[in-house]
Image (spheres, grey):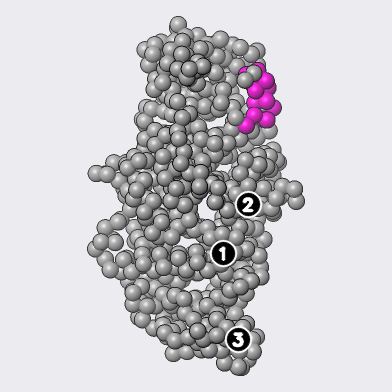
Amino acid sequence: MDIHKQFDLFLLGKETNAHKWMGAHLLRNDEGYIYATRFILYAPNAKMVKLLGSFNDYNGDNHLMEKIDYKGLFSITIPENLEWATYRYQIITNDNQYLYKSDPFAFFTEERPNNASRVYDIDGYQWQDQKFHYEKKAPYEEPVLIYELHFGSWQRKYGEFKKYNEVVDDLINYIHYMGFTHVEFLPIYEHPLDDSWGYQGTGFFAATSRYGSPKDLMYLIDRLHQAGIGVIIDWVLGHINKDAFGLYFFDGTPLYEIEDEYLRENVTWGTANLDFSKGITRSFMTSALSFWMDYFHVDGFRIDAVSNLLYYLGNSQVGENQHAINYLRELSAHLFSKESRLIFSAEDSTAFPKVTHPTYSGGVGFNYKWNMGFMNDTLEYFKLDLIYRKYHSNLITFSHVYAFNEQFILPFSHDEVVHMKGSLINKMPGDYYSKFANWRLAVTYYMTFPGKKLFFMGTEFAVFAEWDFRKELDWHLLVEYPSHQKAHRYFRDLAHVYKNHPALFRLDHKPETMRWLIADHHDNSLFAYTRESHRQLLVVVLNMTPTYYDYYEIGVPRKGYYEEVINSDKDIYFGDNQYNGQILATIDGHRNGYDQYIKVKVGSLAAIILKHRRTNT
């Protein structure tokens, strides 16, 4: 490899594998033995760089790095195998600042609160997930049900973090049992502060050492893949934290950041915005995402705070960040060239057009976007006292107006269960019983509305407490309380209904896959709609009040028979056991725009899914 040619590409923003030569690398001879360790660093404002490490008692006087390119590239090769050694760089700037920096390209670090980089052999893991990658399909016509997970608080051991390889069996068995298709990890790369949940990272090429080594994480992902479970990781692309040892003002200047202080400072998060007009910033982030695809076999990325990339400071009035938008298009093209079946999703609360449209048609290049409007409207509706719901039917129906403008993921994420917002079930009005009934309604609405699905951990068994990253989920609820056991069963059964009915997931970004049957029965607060594929028709009924109906006449688009697939009011789900035990035959007669209808028994606060059959067999 000609490092100088790669360095020129790095400066131009065209390097996609900077991690293969930047940072610390173990050098092997023809027999495979490690004979030296090489360090390469970019710091153009440095007049001198010293390498400090456990191998020299952090005294770098004898390990002065050589400037191998006048544009700011420094290197040193030490004729020793330094695997597992800790190190950092002492950068003496042209204006005589003394900076002590971790390696931006380190593959491993010390465990917090320490923050030195660690020399690590990232190569050599023997993957066993070939069958998964061979059989994996593009997500568009497949069920996608994502379990969003914060690794440090899913399970704990005596109050402390479990390691990657300690969680693997329980996690795989649980996700498989519950019917999730993917797990999405909150940022799993290195970050100094537990309280940031990983969103203020310092080591974009390093799996966090909190939970073990990088190869331990590879093992976890490998096992997930062998169980048929995809892996998505959360990623902060647009801004970096300001810890002194990190990427921030790396050589005493805003090297990777925006130079204008007003546009650089992200006051909301206390971070600094990156400058994607700079080739080095583009090369750095493209290399980082490529690294996680190549070395950790991840199946997708969820990009955090995309509004902060589309607009300067996330504010449309400040102006479009055209450099970042252009970069997103470049990044999309690159990632999809590596893996066409990737999930590349945007957490974006703006109305910026064509976020999930292909770049060749003027789009930004994501293939999914979190539907924040749907989430906000849905939660606002379900939080209403039941007597007021009839005045706010638009909160349910309006989402359909824009449901197909983009390819959406419907999120109920970690952001909705922190900072005094309450868990999903605790958002629900009414007494204990009503909260569970409303919870079942809400998850049914999420699961049957067009779009892929994402639920934050704990939602699936109706935890009452807000998420606390300092402790594990309230698993004791599943042991001690039948109500939570039954909620857990309902979510699992509903997940399997979703996965086994193509009408709920196939081409669910196309408008012909859903139509309203009842959207204007405001006084009753009862809604009905179809979900359709070319061979399947489902009818979803949602009764948003405690009113019970011996039968409710609902016009349907096809004659024949309708069989109940699932009913949230069954007693096995903590309901009143009012369900349709017999197959329902259509009756000739005009109802809500159709020439035939069915009479459906509808329990109080009940969600029902019916499947059309041509014959009663």
Q: Which mark is residue 422?
A: none
Q: Tell me if 366 is positioned left or right of 296 in this view.
A: right
Q: Which residue is mark 2?
A: 367
Q: Say which of 174 and 359 sits in front.
A: 174
Quarter location, residue 125: top left
Nearest to viewer (mark 1 / mark 2): 1
Q: Which residue is mark 1?
A: 505
Q: Earlier in the sequence, mark 3 or mark 2?
A: 2
Are dots 1 and 2 in contact, CB under 8 Å? no
Q: Position of residue 432 (x, y in %)?
A: 32, 71
Residue shown at the point (48%, 44%) measured from the top left = 129
Q: Which residue is mark 3?
A: 559
Q: Secondary structure at mark 3?
A: loop
Q: Earlier in the sequence, mark 1 or mark 2?
A: 2
- State the extent of the magenta-drawn residues as a range: 3-16
Callout 1, which amino acid?
Answer: Phe
Count residues near mark 3 (Cα–Cα under 10 Å), then give few for <14, some for 14-19, many for 20+: some
Callout 2, which amino acid?
Answer: Asn
Residue shown at the point (39%, 51%) measured from the top left = 172
Residue shown at the point (57%, 92%) measured from the top left = 587
